[in-house]
Image (cartoon, rainbow, N blue to C red):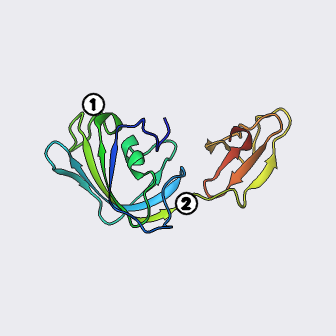
Amino acid sequence: MKIGSNEYKSKVLVVATGPAGAADVKAPNTRVSATVVGKLESDGSTFWKSQGDFDYVYGETPRHLIVGFDVGSYGMKKGETRMVCIPPEEGYGPVGRPGIPSNSTLVFTLGCDKVTPPPGPVGFKDTPVPSGGKDMCSGCETGSPGKCLATEGGKCHWSGFYGCCISNSSQ
């Protein structure tokens, strides 16, 4: 499923819109700073409140946030306030967390203070992959340290920002 599609069950209410032309959250690996308050839908009790801005990365792989948090962040602009209602299957499900009973519906209020888009392909360095395919390419594998996975004489792109190599054949 694609974030931004109607296939998710999390619901988003835009309480205050961000200014026209403000940076928004759409591309994976967008960095976001927001004030966050998390409450249980069942009784309205607060289970978490950020101390100042909570910095997170939208659409990060591997995922470090619950799915509903990414769903609620999609399209959010700097200066915007949102309420996000996240059902258990897009939250913590049957596992729960300290202060969050299993199968809880969560309600987050997000106040977006900063959106930093991911770096683009500008400044990437093409590095030919030796014939035979799998081999070292700037010392990393697609998405993690190790070998580059580009094959058949493709090229890898070294991203100094993320410190990993991206195969243009897989994009």
Determine whether 171 is above or below 21 in the image: above
Residue closest to the far left = 43
Question: Disc 2 versus disc 1: distance between alpha carbons?
Answer: 34 Å
Which residue is disc 2 drawn over?
117
**Residue type at numbered disc 1:** Pro
Which is nearer the eye, 126 or 114? 114
The reply to whether residue 138 is visible in this rendering is no
Give the x, y percent position of residue 23. Answer: 50, 64
Which is more foreground, mark 2 or mark 1?
A: 2
- Which residue is found at the position 76% from the left and 34% from the top? 134
Left/right placement of residue 64 relative to residue 145 reads left
Which sits in the foreground, 165 or 84? 84
Dot 2 falls on a residue whose secondary structure is loop
Q: Residue furthest front?
A: 20
Q: Give percent across and percent down for residue 73.
A: 41, 52
Mark 2 is surrounded, within 10 Å at the Cα level, by few (under 14), some (14 to 19) or many (20 or more) other residues, namely some
Whether label 2 touches label 1, CB < 8 Å: no
Kind of residue at badge 2: Pro
Q: Of the residues under marks 2 and 1, which one precedes in the sequence?
A: 1
Quadrant of res 120: bottom right
Q: Quadrant of residue 109?
A: bottom left
Q: What residue does disc 1 label?
A: 94
Left or right for 128, reference 101 = right
Relative image position of residue 93 (x, y in whole percent): 30, 33
Residue 157 visible in the displayed image: yes
Vertical comparison of 115 with 72: above or below: below
